[in-house]
Amino acid sequence: MTDSPTPPLPTYIQAIIKSEERFKHIVEHHKYSLNYHEEAQFAKTQIAQTVKLQHCTPQSIHDSLLQAASLGLTLNHQKKLCYLTTRYNKELQALECKLDITYHGLYTLALETGVVQFVVAERVFESDIQNGGFEYLGPLQPN
């Protein structure tokens, strides 16, 4: 009886594995606290749960992971800083993986880089604008 050959890893897994060395270099260079193995698992989970992500080009998956590393943002869905999403590239006629940064992620980046000292975020609904219930009063001053 012969052992059956091991099937090849899905291309998205191969892309994640390919990013390891560069990911670790970026994180070390910037002194971020991201852990490659944790981030790889977050990426695998997001991709496994989203069929469209499984069909993205391996290079775009690789690039998205490195972009997250270079920004110091975790893919941990509980922190809601960024997510892997898909975009259709008409030139390549292929789905590409893109890193989408949430407003939580933008807030984190702005504070950590010192661009801003504080942020006040409040919801504004379309009906607020249409009914004249929203008025921009300019920048606030910290208390």
Image: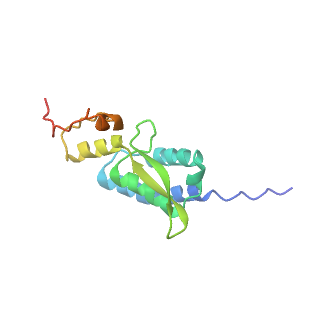
Residue with the most extreme right position: 1
Tell me: 4 left or right of 56. right
Of the 4 image quadrants, the one containing the N terminus is bottom right
Looking at the image, which residue is at 34% across and 35% down? 127
Percent from the top left, x then y, of residue 31?
30, 49
Q: How is the image coloured?
A: rainbow
Percent from the top left, x then y, of residue 68?
39, 52
Looking at the rendered structure, the number of numbered marks drawn on it comes to 0
Looking at the image, which residue is at 36% across and 56% down? 26
Q: Nearer the viewer, residue 49 or 139?
A: 139
Looking at the image, which residue is at 59% across and 59% down? 11
Tell me: 97 left or right of 102. right
Q: Relative to residue 52, is residue 132 depicted above or below?
A: above
Q: Nearer the viewer, residue 69 or 143?
A: 143
Residue with the most extreme bottom position: 91
Q: Relative to residue 35, is residue 119 depicted above or below?
A: above
Tell me: 53 left or right of 8. left
Residue with the most extreme top position: 143
Of the 4 image quadrants, the one containing the C terminus is top left
Residue with the most extreme front position: 131
Percent from the top left, x then y, of residue 115?
20, 47
Looking at the image, which residue is at 55% across and 67% down? 93
Q: Nearer the viewer, residue 130 or 15?
A: 130
Q: Can you tell which quarter of the image residue 104 is in?
A: top left
Percent from the top left, x then y, of residue 141?
12, 35
Q: Relative to residue 127, is residue 24 depicted above or below?
A: below
